[in-house]
């Protein structure tokens, strides 16, 4: 019971503190970019306070994320509120199960599609006339790339043939953070759409 109250209190602090974190983050960005005068003592103190608040909020975010993974009651409470999930009777329990299955299946299909897009590398380029292959200067390159870890980009070797790219695709053009956020939003939208469609 005490742990439940503790988690509920931290969750409220996390949610109510989000606007303040956004304001502090905007100020910290302005301070680091030189928009704010660094000579002002009070602004320097405010920047230090902003860093402390953001660090505490990040720590709180990690704690709540871990609790969502390991605590079933806390997870059920938070996720149910987040997705507007209701199970007031047996019919709604059945509909929730079907909608959850649909959301899981569609999300898995999207993940498979994104995995394929992240592995495929396609390049269409033009070679200089002196480097033509069998008299052809336009080339198409297809490749599969799969890396468990991110690697830093290395410079091109000096003996690399100069080529003019016409079209080049080497993975998803968005960041991993954007993909994760879109998948979270998709899960919520997909579940609510499915529950409404099944309830008709």
Image: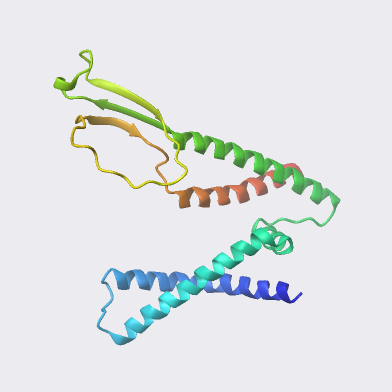
Q: Where in the figure is residue 161, as x and y percent of width and height?
A: 20, 29
Colouring rule applied to residues: rainbow
In the image: residue 27, left or right of residue 146: left
- Which residue is at 65% across, 64% downward? 67
Q: 180 or 163: which is nearer to us?
A: 163
Residue 86 placement: quadrant: bottom right
Q: 137 or 146: which is nearer to us?
A: 146
**Residue 151 visible in image:** yes
Q: Please tell me how many numbered marks the rendered image carries.
A: 0
Residue 169 in the image: above or below residue 139: below
In the image: residue 178, left or right of residue 134: right
In the image: residue 81, left or right of residue 90: left
**Residue 200 visible in image:** no
Residue 7 in the image: above or below residue 173: below
- Residue at the left extreme, as displayed: 130
- Which residue is at 26% across, 78% downward? 37
Q: Where in the figure is residue 6, as x and y percent of width and height?
A: 67, 75
- Which residue is at 68% across, 60% downward? 70
Residue 123 placement: quadrant: top left
Q: Where in the figure is residue 165, as x and y percent of width and height?
A: 26, 31
Q: Quadrant of the C terminus?
A: top right
- Residue at the bottom extreme, as displayed: 41
- Residue at the top extreme, as displayed: 134
Q: Where in the figure is residue 114, as x and y percent of width and height?
A: 50, 38
- Which residue is at 55% across, 36% downward? 112
Q: Quadrant of the N terminus?
A: bottom right
């Amino acid at each position: 019971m005490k742990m439940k109250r503790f988690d509920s209190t931290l969750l409220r602090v996390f949610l109510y503190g989000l606007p303040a974190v956004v304001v502090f983050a905007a100020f910290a960005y302005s301070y680091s970019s030189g928009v704010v005068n660094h000579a002002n003592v009070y602004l320097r103190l405010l920047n230090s306070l902003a860093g402390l608040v953001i660090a505490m909020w990040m720590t709180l975010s990690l704690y709540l994320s871990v609790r969502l993974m390991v605590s079933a009651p806390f997870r059920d409470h938070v996720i149910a509120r987040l997705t507007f999930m209701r199970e007031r009777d047996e019919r709604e329990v059945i509909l929730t199960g079907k909608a959850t299955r649909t959301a899981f299946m569609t999300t898995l299909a999207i993940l498979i599609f994104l995995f394929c897009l992240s592995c495929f590398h396609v390049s269409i380029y033009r070679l200089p006339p002196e480097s033509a292959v069998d008299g052809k200067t336009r080339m198409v390159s297809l490749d599969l790339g799969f890396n468990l870890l991110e690697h830093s980009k290395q410079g091109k070797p000096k003996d690399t043939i100069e080529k003019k790219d016409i079209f080049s695709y080497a993975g998803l053009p968005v960041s991993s953070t954007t993909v994760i956020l879109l998948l979270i939003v998709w899960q919520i939208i997909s579940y609510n759409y499915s529950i409404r469609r099944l309830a008709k």
